[in-house]
Image (cartoon, rainbow, N blue to C red):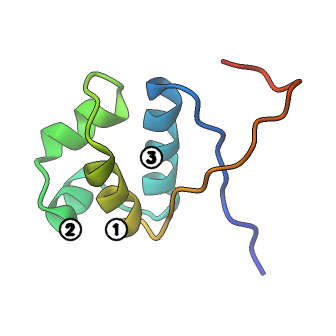
Amino acid sequence: MEKPLTHSIRSLRQAAAALRARRRAQGMTQKQLAETTGTAQSTISDIETGVVSVSLDVYLRLLEALGAELTVTGRMPDQDTN
């Protein structure tokens, strides 16, 4: 069984990188993700570069289209905050 991709997200930049990595791992283009979610491709690009922040609802819709989910865990005290 393949281990799922996991990302620690503590910033908009990290959220953008996680979304981009997941999309690429799925072999999906920004255009395909946009069409699947009813979001403009330019918005996907802006989200992935951290230019714009979106509502949690939009982010969850993007994750769902990518077969991913949001999980909240306790923070380890010695983890890097970057």
Does 2 sit left or right of 16 as displayed? right
Q: Position of residue 37 (x, y in %)?
A: 20, 63
At horizontal 30% and vertical 55% (from top left) the residue drawn is 29
For mark 1, does the 10 Å Cα neighbourhood hold few (<14), some (14 to 19), or many (20 or more) residues? some
| Disc 2 residue type (three-letter) | Thr
Q: CA distance from mark 3 to mark 2?
A: 15 Å
Rendered image: mark on residue 65: 1
| Disc 3 residue type (three-letter) | Leu
- Contact flag, marks 1 and 2 (Cβ < 8 Å): yes
Rendered image: mark on residue 36: 2
At horizontal 43% and vertical 35% (from top left) the residue drawn is 16
Q: Position of residue 40 (x, y in %)?
A: 10, 48
Q: Height in image: 72 above or below 11?
A: below
Does 78 sit left or right of 15 as displayed? right
N-terminal-most mark, 3 or 2: 3
Q: Secondary structure at mark 2?
A: helix
Q: Which residue is mark 3?
A: 19
- Rendering quarter of residue 28: bottom left
- Rendering quarter of residue 33: bottom left
Q: Nearer the viewer, residue 82 or 30?
A: 82
N-terminal-most mark, 3 or 1: 3
Q: Secondary structure at mark 1?
A: helix
| Disc 1 residue type (three-letter) | Ala
Q: CA distance from mark 3 to mark 1?
A: 11 Å
Q: CA distance from mark 1 to mark 2?
A: 7 Å
Q: Position of residue 25 (x, y in %)?
A: 52, 58
Rendered image: mark on residue 21: none
